[in-house]
């Protein structure tokens, strides 16, 4: 499966996509098969990939741990039906990751 996040700047763009469409309003892309369509789980896997691949090397270890925690908290909010809180935590992640 192709990656949505391929650079630090595409991670920033992807965060915006997740904020707008999570938890279950992701656009259906006609060029993707049904199993490749973006879901909440896939989106957060991609966010974790971007964090690890493009921010770890430039982050202070404590900041990196904080960013990991924010991603998990955001996902928990979305999974519990608290979409606004999930989006706000993801925006907090963005503010720290991209000051």
Image (cartoon, rainbow, N blue to C red):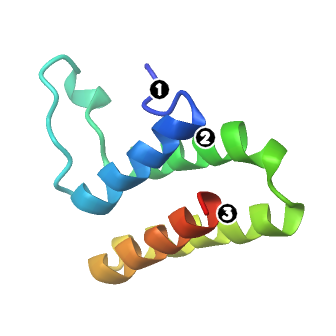
Question: Is residue 40 in view?
Answer: no
**Left or right of 72: which side holds 69?**
right
- Circle 2/circle 1 CB separation < 8 Å: yes
- Residue at left 46%, top 68%? 90
**Residue 42 drawn above or below residue 95:** above
- Circle 1/circle 3 CB separation < 8 Å: no
Disc 1 element: loop
Q: Upstream in the sequence, badge 2 or badge 1?
A: 1
Disc 2 element: helix
Q: Dividing the picture into quarters, in which one does residue 69 lie?
A: bottom right
- According to the picture, the residue beneath numbered tag 1 turns out to be 3
Q: Quadrant of the C terminus?
A: bottom right
Query: Crowdedness of circle 1 by 10 Å Cα count: few (<14), some, many (20+)?
Result: few
Q: Position of residue 30 (x, y in %)?
A: 12, 22
**Left or right of 79: which side holds 81?**
left
Q: Upstream in the sequence, badge 2 or badge 3?
A: 2
Real-space Cα separation, disc 2 to disc 1, in angstroms: 9 Å
Q: Upstream in the sequence, badge 1 or badge 3?
A: 1
- According to the picture, the residue beneath numbered tag 2 turns out to be 49
Disc 3 element: helix
- Residue at left 35%, top 54%? 16
Real-space Cα separation, disc 1 to disc 3, in angstroms: 19 Å
- According to the picture, the residue beneath numbered tag 3 turns out to be 68
Q: Position of residue 58 (x, y in %)?
A: 80, 47
Q: Position of residue 71 (x, y in %)?
A: 56, 65
Q: Dividing the picture into quarters, in which one does residue 70 lie?
A: bottom right
**Residue 19 drawn above or below residue 15:** below
In the image shown, does 13 or 33 lie closer to the viewer?
13
């Amino acid at each position: 499966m192709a990656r949505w996040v391929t650079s630090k700047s595409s991670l920033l763009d992807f965060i915006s996509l997740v904020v707008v469409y999570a938890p279950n309003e992701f656009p259906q892309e006609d060029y993707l098969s049904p199993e490749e369509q973006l879901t909440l789980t896939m989106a957060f896997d991609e966010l974790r990939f971007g964090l690890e691949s493009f921010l770890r090397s430039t982050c202070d270890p404590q900041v990196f741990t904080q960013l990991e925690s924010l991603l998990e908290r955001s996902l928990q909010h979305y999974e519990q039906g608290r979409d606004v809180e999930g989006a706000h935590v993801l925006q907090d992640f963005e503010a720290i990751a991209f000051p």
